[in-house]
Amino acid sequence: MKFDFLPNLPKSDLDDRTFKDLVDECMLRIPRYCPEWTNHNPADPGVTLIELFAWLTDQMLLRFNQVPRANYVAFLELLGIQLQPPAPAHTEVTFYLSRGQSAQERIPDIPAGTEVATERTEGEDAVIFSTDRSLAIGIPNILHFLTAEQTEQTPQRLRDRLSNLWTEEDDGRWAGPAQSTFQAFPQAGNCFYLVLDPTEPLDGNVIVLEVEGEAAGSTGINPDDPPLRWEAWDGVAWRPILLQPSDDGSRGFSFDDGSQGVQLGICQAEITLHLPIHWPSAYFSNYRGRWLRCTCLRSGGEDQIGYSRSPQLTAVRARSIGGATPVSQCQSVQLELLGDSTGKPGQSFQLHNGSILPRQEGEHLIVTSPISLQEEVWREVPDFSDSGPNDRHYTLDSITGEIQFGPLIQEAAKLKEETQFRRQIQQQGAPLTQDDIPKLERLERQYGAVPPKGSIIRMAAYRTGGGKRGNVQKQALRVLKSAVPYVSRIANHRPAINGADAESLEEAVIRVPSFLRTRERAVTPEDFETLAYQSSRAVARAYCPKKQTEAGTVLLLLAPRTDTSGIDAGEGLAPERFVLSSQLRKDVLSYLDDRRLLGIEVKLDEPAYVGVSVQAEVGIDPQQYGTLQAQRALTQRLETELYRFLNPLTGGGDNKGWPFGAPLYKSDIIGLLQQTPGVRYLGAVELFALFRDDDRWNRMLVTEGEIDPGPSGLICSWADPDPNLRSAHAISLRY
C-alpha cells in the first residue's frame, strides 16, 4: 500500500533482486539442470521463456515488497489508531403551536428524541434529525417595564414604568396611560427593558409581544428601516432575537400599516421574538427575571432618519407561540435484539446499523440471564487491556456497529522469573545453552466477562447517523416524523452545521505522525491543534496562536467542516456555515481537558472572518466565446474559481484552506484570473472587503491593494441574498 502524499522514507525490501538479476541467475543454472542446452542466444525461444518468467517474478516481488492494505490497518491498530466515526450535523428546530396556552391548560413538553426530517424526493431520501432534549413552553408573564437613557452591559440606572401607573389584567396584559419608551427627544442608546417571570420555562421559546400605541406617523422614522435592536440577556452577553424585520409588526412602533386595527387613535401590532436556547434569569438593579431589551440606534438629526419623538405605548402583553430546541442528525433505536450468547470468549454481535454516534446516558448493553431472567447492564470500554475476568465489559466499533466481548488469551507464566534467570546467566559470562532455557508453562487469561450460554443480548438504545449530508440549508426541516400534540408546523431558521463523514484510511495515515509526536498530551500550540483534529471529525481547521494574550489560558480557533457544494453552485460559503455548535464546543473541550496540563484553561473561539468581493473586467476572444451560452459558462467558471480560492476550507495556494492571518493581495486575484483558460487580458480589478459589525456586515472599497484579516483572521467569500450587501463576485466580459 503506497501513499503519494507521505514522505518517501528509505525502506529495506524483502527481496531486492531485479529483472536482470533473475535472468542472469536462470542463465547460470542452465549448465547444471540442462547441460544439453548450449545455444544461449537471445533469439532462442528458451531464453525468451526465461525472460518472460523473470518478468512475472519481478512483478510478484514488486507486490511482495509493498505493505498490504490489511497489514497497514493492523499496524495502525497496534498503535491505537482507530478510524473516527462520522460527526452529526446540528441545528435548531422551532416548533410552532396550533393554539396558545393558559395557566389552567398547559401544553405538554415536546419530548427528547422527537424526529423531524427533510422532505423526501424521488432521487434522495429524507435526512432525519432528533431533538437533543425536551422542550417546555411556558407562559411569559411580564413583571417589569423599565427604561434607561443609555445601554449598559449590566443595567443599573433604570426607571420603572409599571408601578402605580399600569394595571395588570387577568390575561397578563398591562395597560394604562401612554408611556414613553425612550426620552422625549430620543437619542442613540436609549432603551427599555421587559423583565419576564423567572419561574416559567422560557428557554428557546418564541413569544409574541402584543403592543398598543399611537397611530402612524407620530415618531418620524422610516418604517421600512426602523432604528431598533431587540436583544435578550443569555447570561454572557446581549443576543439579537428579532429573526427578520418583518417579524416587527409595529414597524418600529410607528404602527404604519393599513392592516392594523385602529380604535380611538390606538393601534395594535405584534412583534415576534425568538428567545435564546439558554435563557437564564439575571439580577440587575434590584430586579430579577429574564431580560429583554429594545435599543434605539439612531437619533433624529438632520443627516439621519431617527425618532423625532418617543413612541407612546398604552398596553403590552406577551404570549408563547412555540419554541426552539437543538437537534442532531440521527435516528434513535430502542431495545434492539442482537441474539443469544454461546458462552464462548471473544464472541461478537452486529448491530443492524453502522455509524453509531457517541454514546449518551442510557445507551448501553443489556444481558438477560437465561435462569433468573435478571437484566444486567454492561459497560462499554475502548479496549480490554484493564478488564478482569469478572468485569462486565464490551467494545463497540462506532463505524461498523460490531459489539465484541472479552477474548481468552494465552500468556507465558513465570515470565519475570525467566527474565531474571537470563540476566544472571549473562552477568556470569557463560553462554546460554538449551538446558538453561526453562520450559514455559502456558496459562490462559480471560479479559472481560463472558455472558453465560443462552443469555439474551440486547442494546438498550443507540443513535445512528452523521455525515456531511446532514448539513442541510435553512427551512429544509419541515416534516414531523410523528404527530406531536398542538404542533402545527416546524422550521429550522439556521442551516445545519458541523456534519462530517467518517474518517478514511488515507486521512488516518496522515495523522499518525502527529499522533506519535503528541502522545495524547497537549503542551505546545501544535499539540493543541493536533488534538483538536482528533477530538471530532467536525473540526476542519484548528489554529493555536504562538503568542497567547492571557497567562494560563490557551486560545484555540476552530473552523468546522461543512458542505462545500455551494462553491460549485456559485454561492460560496457564508460565515454562518462556520459557526461552532454548542455540541462541538463540548466535544472538543471535553477531549482536551483530559490531555492538557494542570492549571491550563482552554478557550475555543471562531476566527475573525473577513469577506471579499471581487469586481473584474475580463477580456475574451470573441471567436471562441461568441455565443451567450459560452460567455455564461466562462463567467460561472471564473466566479467558481474565486469562491474556491477565497475560502477557509478549499482556498489558498495549496487548496487546503486560506492560511490563518494571511493577507489577500490584488496580485493574487490577478494571477488566479490570468491562469483561467479563455482569459486574454484583464481590465480593472477592484477588491471590496466585508467586515462584521455586531450582526451586520459593512462593505468598503480596498484602495491599498491588500486585505489584512488580522493575525488570526480568515478570508472567505459568498453570495449573500441581501442585495444591499453586494457580497457576490461580479465578472464582466469584454471583447
Image (spheres, grey):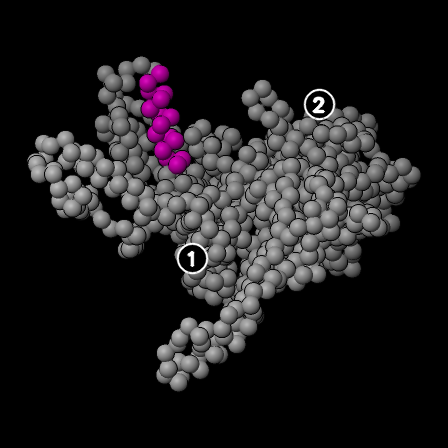
The amino acid type of the residue labelled 2 equals Gly
Image quarter where the C terminus lies is top left
Mark-to-mark CA distance, 2 and 1:
66 Å
Stretch of the chain drawn in magenta: 629-644
Q: Is residue 630 magenta?
A: yes
Residue lying at 39% horizontally and 80% vertically, measured from the top left: 426
**Which quadrant would residue 186 be assigned to in this image?**
top right
Residue 29 in the image: state x and y as whole percent. Answer: 17, 45
Determine the residue located farthest toward the bottom in the rendered image: 428
* Above or below, comparing residue 575 to residue 251 in the picture: below
* Above or below, comparing residue 187 to residue 110 in the picture: below
Labelled disc at residue 258: 2
In this view, the residue in front, 44 or 121, is 44
Residue 457 in the image: state x and y as whole percent. Answer: 72, 45
Counting residues from the start of the chain, the first of labels 2 and 1 encountered is 2
Labelled disc at residue 514: 1
Q: Main secondary structure of the magenta part?
A: helix
Residue lying at 62% horizontally and 51% vertically, measured from the top left: 346
Determine the residue located farthest toward the top in the rendered image: 627
* Above or below, comparing residue 192 to residue 420 in the picture: above
In this view, the residue in front, 179 or 378, is 378
Is residue 351 visible in the rendered image? The answer is yes
The amino acid type of the residue labelled 1 equals Ser
Residue 181 in the image: state x and y as whole percent. Answer: 72, 44
Image quarter where the N terminus lies is top left
In this view, the residue in front, 299 or 331, is 331
Element type at mark 2: loop
Residue lying at 39% horizontally and 76% vertically, measured from the top left: 432
Q: Horizontal placement of 75 versus 733: left or right?
A: right
Q: Horizontal placement of 485 versus 255: left or right?
A: right
